[in-house]
Image: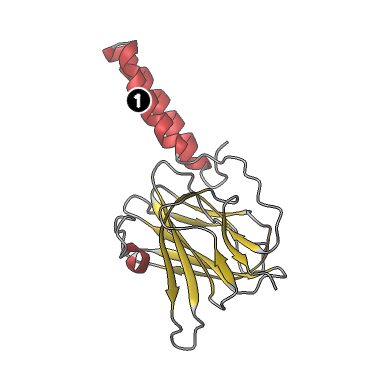
Amino acid sequence: MFAPYARTEVFVTAAVGAGAALATALYAGPLWSILPVAAAAALLSFYRDPHRTPPARKDVLIAPADGRIVDISRIPPTDGSPPLLSITIFLSVMNVHLNRSPCAGRVLAVDYRPGRFLNALDPASNRENESNRVDFEPAAPLPGPVSIRQIAGLLARRIVCAVRPGDSVALGQRVGMIKLGSRTELCAVDDGGWIVEVKIGDVVRGAETIMLSRKAG
């Protein structure tokens, strides 16, 4: 029910909510105890972990998070780096905050970078906020590398990464979490062989929605 990376928060939230409800019931009446219970339930919803079934395909990259597509960009090559195809998902406080592997394969690198905590609705947050990038070597037939970037927001001030270089991952596997509102970016080498399966404004589900697919042939 709850994300494996949020046990402490779940315990503390439940305990504080129960204590606040009891105190409110004693001093203000049972009816008022609904308020702290509702607040605790809202906080607990941030850490939910619903079951997801990835698509039975090997030629796709799937959504690494729940949320809404806010940017689709083609990034030109710089300093020897290849051109990239980037798709960014905005996670509101109402979304599931787990991050998942967009492909099966192996973790190549994990790169944490400190930064600011701008509102995740601000496009500048993609460049300036605290972030953590995970690079994957996808299983055949997908080319690589593929990466996801966990980007903190105004409220999300803790990025959890649960994988390390060398780890094997399955399609849709839980790889971390950004607590409260944030962004997650999916990047693949823009070699001309990808079909973008989403558009700006689409609502996607982590581990289920197909973001990119390979052209036939």
Query: Residue 73 location, x and y as percent?
Result: 42, 69
Residue farthest toward the left in the current orientation of the protein: 28
Q: Quadrant of residue 125?
A: bottom left
Residue 108 seen in the figure:
yes
Question: In which quadrant will I find the C terminus?
Answer: bottom right
Residue beneath the point at 43% across and 49% down: 179
- Pinpoint residue 8: horizontal percent, then vertical percent: 49, 41
Q: Is residue 102 visible?
A: no
Residue 110 found in image quarter? bottom right
Instruction: Give the left or right position of residue 19, taking residue 204 as reference.
Output: left
Residue depicted at x 53% and y 76%:
190
Q: Which residue is mark 1?
A: 36
Where's residue 139, x and y in %? 70, 68
Residue pushed farthest front?
216
x 43%, y 34%: residue? 13
Please say which color scheme the image uses.
secondary structure
Q: Position of residue 198 (x, y in %)?
A: 50, 57
Exactly how many numbered labels are in the figure? Answer: 1
Give 7 or 53, whichever is nearer the viewer: 53
Q: Is residue 108 above or below residue 170?
A: below
Residues 82 and 180: in front is 82
Determine whether the residue tagged by mark 1 lies in a helix, strand or loop: helix
Residue 196 horizontal side relative to residue 137, left or right: left
Residue 151 lies, with reference to residue 47, above or below; the image says below
Q: For the residue carrying disc 1, how many other residues have a C-alpha within 10 Å: few (<14), some (14-19), or many (20+)?
A: some
Residue displayed at 28% across by 14% down? 27
Quarter that holds the N terminus: top right
Which amino acid, mark 1?
Pro
